[in-house]
Image (tube, rainbow, N blue to C red):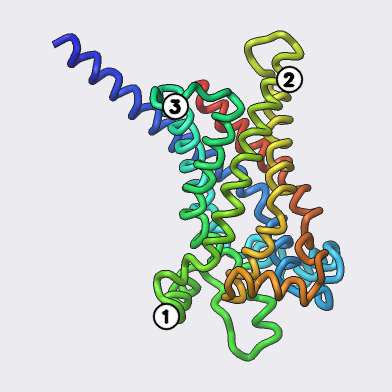
């Protein structure tokens, strides 16, 4: 009887821990997305539109503000990625922590080092999140450039979420929502390693320097900001290809060729500067919010 009670207690703790990861990750993701979204709109426009339209980042910002305003321009289509950010971060933190716990408890392979555990768990978390992210980002990217396309074409593109989804399903079927999955999978698997590894290593380093067991607030913020910079700097060319795949409805190889044809090798890095600017505060917010909620 006591064994049964102990087993039930363990199961309850596991379920509670998983539920906390889902809730805390969702809230953290929403806060981070609100901060980063205007920057992301500019990034996607630079990635998918030629330099004849936007020769510089500043020209893209001025065009968006002048012609579309703040809400319609910078925050066009935010509802979809807001839901996506909640789902993404819930999946990221849940799968990362579950994978790490599995590696701690496994007995069938030699004990893994802390760094190896972070790398495996980060890659696993990123790959899981990619399946949630692809349809969300496809809708987001289409909405972020819809106003530009409508200004230059008589064939109007939908500028709201549901019509965009319906249009995608009509033209390409259900699997059309996962256009660009290969690009997202590669990006998130590699990025997951960079994201979690940078955060964990930076956090431990700062804590070790002070010979303390707990991190201060500024250390969590700095570690989160560093993780965001590392993630985006590592995967940005893949993200560019993914954006082209989703907005042009092309395959991986065709998208790479199109970027090279339009801009050359530098085209893979169009929008990197503004992405790094947004990455620091957004990811600092995500990790700090998650850590704060988890400690309650």
Q: Which residue is mark 2?
A: 206
Give the quarter of the image for residue 195.
Answer: top right
* Mark 1 closeness class: few <14, some 14–19, many ≥20 residues within 10 Å: few
Marks 2 and 1, Cα distance to the nearest angstrom? 52 Å
- Residue 234 lies left or right of residue 178; in this view the side is right
Give the quarter of the image for residue 28.
Answer: top right
Q: Residue at x 62, y 47 (%)?
A: 190
Q: Which residue is mark 3?
A: 109
Q: Of discs 2 and 1, which sits in the foreground? A: 2
Residue 170 got which mark?
1
From the viewer's side, name the closer residue of 5 and 26.
5
**Is tag 2's residue or tag 1's residue first in the polypeptide sequence?**
1
Q: Of discs 3 and 2, which sits in the foreground? A: 3
Location of the N terminus by quadrant is top left
Q: Secondary structure at mark 2?
A: helix
From the viewer's side, name the closer residue of 122 and 199.
122
Q: Residue at x 72, y 60 (%)?
A: 43
From the viewer's side, name the closer residue of 139 and 240.
240
Residue 212: x and y, percent? 68, 9
From the viewer's side, name the closer residue of 161 and 71.
161
Marks 3 and 2, Cα distance to the nearest angstrom? 31 Å
Residue 204: x and y, percent? 67, 20
Residue 213 got which mark?
none
Q: Of discs 3 and 1, which sits in the foreground? A: 3
Is residue 142 among what the camera can see?
A: no
């Amino acid at each position: 009887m006591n064994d049964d009670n102990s087993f039930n207690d363990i199961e309850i703790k596991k379920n509670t821990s998983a539920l906390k990861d889902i809730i805390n990750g969702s809230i953290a993701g929403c806060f981070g997305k609100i901060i980063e979204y205007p920057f992301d709109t500019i990034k996607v426009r630079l990635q998918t539109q030629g330099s004849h339209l936007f020769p510089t980042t500043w020209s893209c910002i001025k065009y968006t503000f002048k012609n579309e305003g703040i809400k319609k321009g910078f925050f066009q289509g935010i509802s979809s990625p807001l839901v996506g950010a909640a789902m993404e971060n819930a999946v990221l933190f849940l799968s990362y922590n579950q994978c790490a716990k599995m590696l701690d408890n496994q007995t069938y392979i030699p004990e893994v080092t802390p760094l190896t555990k972070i790398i495996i768990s980060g890659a696993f978390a990123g790959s899981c999140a990619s399946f949630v992210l692809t349809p969300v980002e496809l809708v987001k990217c289409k909405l972020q450039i819809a106003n530009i396309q409508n200004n230059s074409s008589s064939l109007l593109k939908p500028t709201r979420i549901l019509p965009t989804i319906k249009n995608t399903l009509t033209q390409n079927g259900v699997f059309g929502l996962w256009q660009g999955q290969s690009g997202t999978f590669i990006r998130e698997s590699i990025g997951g390693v960079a994201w979690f590894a940078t955060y964990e290593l930076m956090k431990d380093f700062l804590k070790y320097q002070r010979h303390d067991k707990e991190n201060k607030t500024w250390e969590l913020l700095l570690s989160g900001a560093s993780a965001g910079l590392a993630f985006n700097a590592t995967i940005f060319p893949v993200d560019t290809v993914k954006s082209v795949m989703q907005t042009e409805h092309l395959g991986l190889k065709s998208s790479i060729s199109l970027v090279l044809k339009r801009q050359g090798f530098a085209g893979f890095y169009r929008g990197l500067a503004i992405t790094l600017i947004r990455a620091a505060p957004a990811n600092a917010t995500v990790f700090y919010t998650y850590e704060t909620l988890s400690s309650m």
